[in-house]
Amino acid sequence: MKNFKKFAITIAALNALFFIGCSSDDDFTPTEEEQVENTQLSGVLNSDRILDANVQYSVTGPYLVKSGAKLTIPAGTVIVSQNGTDRYIAVEQGGKIDIQGTSSSPVVMRSEGNTAGDWGGLLLCGKATTTEGVNVTAEVGGLIYGGTDDADNSGSIKYLVIRGAGAQINSESQYNGLTLYAVGSGTSISNVAVIDGADDGIEFFGGTVSASNLYFENNEDDSVDWTEGWNGTITNTYVSNTKPFSTAIEADGDNKNPKIINFTAVSTVGGTALQFKKQSGGTFTNIALSGYTKNVDMKDNGPLENVIVDNTPLTSPEDEVFNGTRVDITAWNWISN
């Protein structure tokens, strides 16, 4: 009996050591299925997550960064989306994104085929003001945006390249490359390129966020679009149109007088450069337009004086005031990624 007890105790001790060893994080090796799952971006993110720049991630469905969570994307990370109408990354109200790209190693978000209209791009939802009110429902996935905090902070975006966005939402709407729903001025956005999108490059739905160093190439609708009373500033923007498109800038709704500083747009296929709908307008400083059939279109015969160029309200859509100094993008090597 004593020998049996000693034997049982020995076996129990060995089992305990075995389970302790198996539970060690250092010794844990995920299965192939678990590794694949970790690279697929879909569902909800409820806590902070840092992606691995050495791993290629795939957007396989809506990926929602919830309130209180932060998604960090290091320099050099590549995210390749499956094709589909519900493939996008969205930061909800109270959530944050931290894109940490650099000039030599930007973050890239693209579709599998780099073809316009493949996926839904990146969306941020904030608590800043919009003329639509508070807690507005977006046309995308029932996302909520809008509030009273114009200093709201949705995070930081630096050196980001988005390709192939613009998937169809419904029969009348498409995703943009970068969509900003009532995003506040506490959010930092700089060095962003949106290339080959089937809809807009960037669209502001109200909000107070500003952005700098923006590059848009061959987006099929508008390169820059704002509505719902956006009143931030964009600085150093370059638009290139070598394929059919709608406008370089489309502005709609109430005029909250956003600031456009150092804006260059070049077309080899004619078209309209600036289109203003309803009461919209803005203040432009150093704007250079080249190759467009029409520089200014007041779509709804709104007040031309709402469009101010180099401190002077326009008096005619044909005013020759769009020959400013071009934005120099020769050092923007990151846009070729």
Image (cartoon, rainbow, N blue to C red):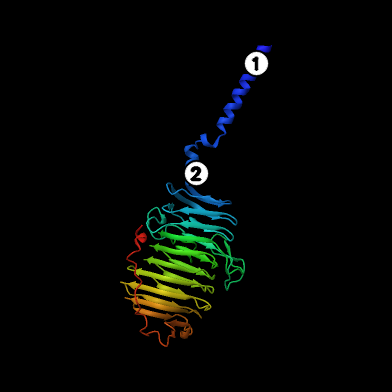
| Placement of 9 over or under 160, stated as above or below | above
The quadrant where residue 5 appears:
top right
Picture disc at residue 37: 2
Residue at the bottom extreme, as displayed: 315
Q: Earlier in the sequence, mark 1 or mark 2?
A: 1
> Which residue does the numbered mark 1 point to in the structure image?
6
Would residue 244 be seen by someone viewing this image from the given angle?
no
Left or right position of 220 against 255: left
On screen, residue 142 above or below 32: below
Percent x, y of residue 16: 61, 26
Instruction: State the residue at coordinates (47%, 43%).
Output: 36
Query: In which quadrant is the N terminus drawn?
Result: top right
Q: Position of residue 330 (x, y in %)?
A: 32, 66
Q: Which mark is residue 190?
A: none
Name the one closer to the observer, 240 or 73. Answer: 73
Q: Residue at x 37, y 73 (%)?
A: 264
Q: Position of residue 300 (x, y in %)?
A: 47, 81
Describe residue 95's horizontal placement relative to residue 195 as left or right. right
Circle 1 SS class: helix
- Amino acid found under the numbered disc labelled 1: Lys
